[in-house]
Every structure is written in structure tokens, then in C-alpha cells.
Amino acid sequence: MSRIVEVRGLCYAWEDGTEALRGIDFNLDAGQTVALLGPNGSGKTTFALHLNGLLQPSAGSVLIDGVAVRGKHLAAIRRKVGLVFQDSDNQLFMPTVLEDVAFAPLSAGLSPEQATDKAIAALRQVGMESKSGKAPWHLSSGEKKRVAIAGILASDPLLLVLDEPTTFLDPPGQRSLATLLAGLPQAKILITHDMPFARSLAAEAVFFQEGSITARGSLEQIVTQFDW
């Protein structure tokens, strides 16, 4: 099984000197799903933002598919690592759903025809092909989440990183999202406080506390250990 993520000694400090990450070691293999658990402010999202270079380490290393997340590699890394933000409105910005999903393939150098084909295939994969002509802001929260995921799938990623993906979704929307994600072959990192959602997708979890990973094991073991 190939190694998708390899993080060694990752440290990060904010401009005021506050340590946000303190020596993180983390691995993830192809097809694996892991939940990141821990209190707000423990470093989970800060860690995730290092996986495609939106933040750069103060110390340590981050490799995606064996390639360092820095410099000339960043454009390729960002196609391999798709971040799904908590609020989909932060990801959807084009006039129509189709244009939004086609944006990344176009930016990667595909022709308009190729990018459109990629976008349609990705929308079909998430069950949103019929909404391709709609404006993103006319969609429901669940539909926006699916379009945001389609925009990532259009780049053929190796890894999906989802930050509190069930926020703004009602229970049917949460279940529908879990079903969609379970059917996708990519490795996944779930940052979530939603334990039913985590249980539906991840058998393994890591626990963050004050910028460090303090435990890794089965989801149920971690939930029990930390009374989460």
C-alpha cells in the first residue's frame, strides 16, 4: 500500500510566537480514512493547512506521495490534496456550478472542452450533474458541499481533507454526505466533532491536544480514552 502522507517533526508558530503545532508525526496510506479529534484550538485545522502548502512549517517536513510540500511542487500538490472547507461558500465563486467545477482543470492547463468533460464527470460522481447550470448560491447547504467536493474530484486527487464537513447540514444531509464519501476511493482525513459521522467513515482516529498528537488508535479506543 502506497504512502500518501508522511509528516515528520512538524512544528508551526504564528507570527506572535505562539506555538500551534509541536512536533507532529503522522502517516496516511492510500485509501485510508482517519478522523482528527480534539478540542477547538488544538491544531487540527492548522495541521490540515500544511498538507497542501497553505501554511509552511517552522520546522519538520511534509511529504505528499513522496514529494515535499513546498516551492515548485505546490501546484501539483494542490491537485493531489483537496481541502473541503467547513463553509462551502468559501470555495464556490464562479457564476455557475459547471464553471466552478471546471475552474481547477482549466487552471491546470486543460482545454475548455477537456475541463468541461472533467467537470461533468465530477458532478455526475456526486449526483449534481442536473444542477450544472445553476448559480452556486441558489443551492442548499448539502448541494453546495457536493459541488465543493466535485470541484476537488475534477483534479483527480489522492487525498480529501474535510474540515467539519457536516456543519450547516441537517441529519438527512449528513447521512447523504457520509454515503457519498464512503463511495469515493481517495484517502480521507476528517476533522470533526460529529461522532456518528466519524463512525460511519473512519475506523481510526488521532487525538490533538495543544498542538500535539497525543494518541492514535481505533476510533472507539480514542473516544473512550478521552471521553470524547
Image (cartoon, grey):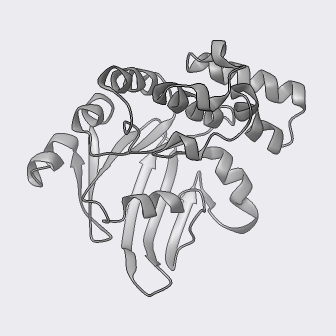
Q: Outermost residue toward the bottom?
A: 17
Picture coordinates of residue 129, whole percent (x, y): 65, 15
View extreme (top): residue: 130
Q: Nearer the viewer, residue 200 or 149?
A: 149
Residue 82 appears in view: no
Image-based side of 159 in relation to 179, left or right: right
Q: Is residue 45 above or below residue 175?
A: below
Residue 81 point in image, percent of width and height: 58, 47
Q: Is residue 216 left or right of residue 33?
A: left
Q: Going by the picture, which residue comes out furthest to the front?
A: 138
User: Residue at the spot x=35%, y=27% of the render?
Assistant: 174
Q: State the residue at coordinates (27%, 47%).
A: 205
Q: Nearer the viewer, residue 31 or 150?
A: 150
Left or right: residue 227 versus residue 156 is: left
Q: Position of residue 179 (x, y in %)?
A: 39, 20
Q: Is residue 111 positioned above or below 134 on the image?
A: below
Q: 30 or 136, which is in the foreground?
A: 136
Say whether residue 101 is left or right of residue 32: right
Q: Is residue 91 visible?
A: yes
- Residue at 66% in and 67% down: 70
Say above or below: 207 vs 82: below
Say how many tags the image has.
0
Residue found at x 50% / y 48%: 3
In which quadrant of the rendered view does residue 176 lie?
A: top left
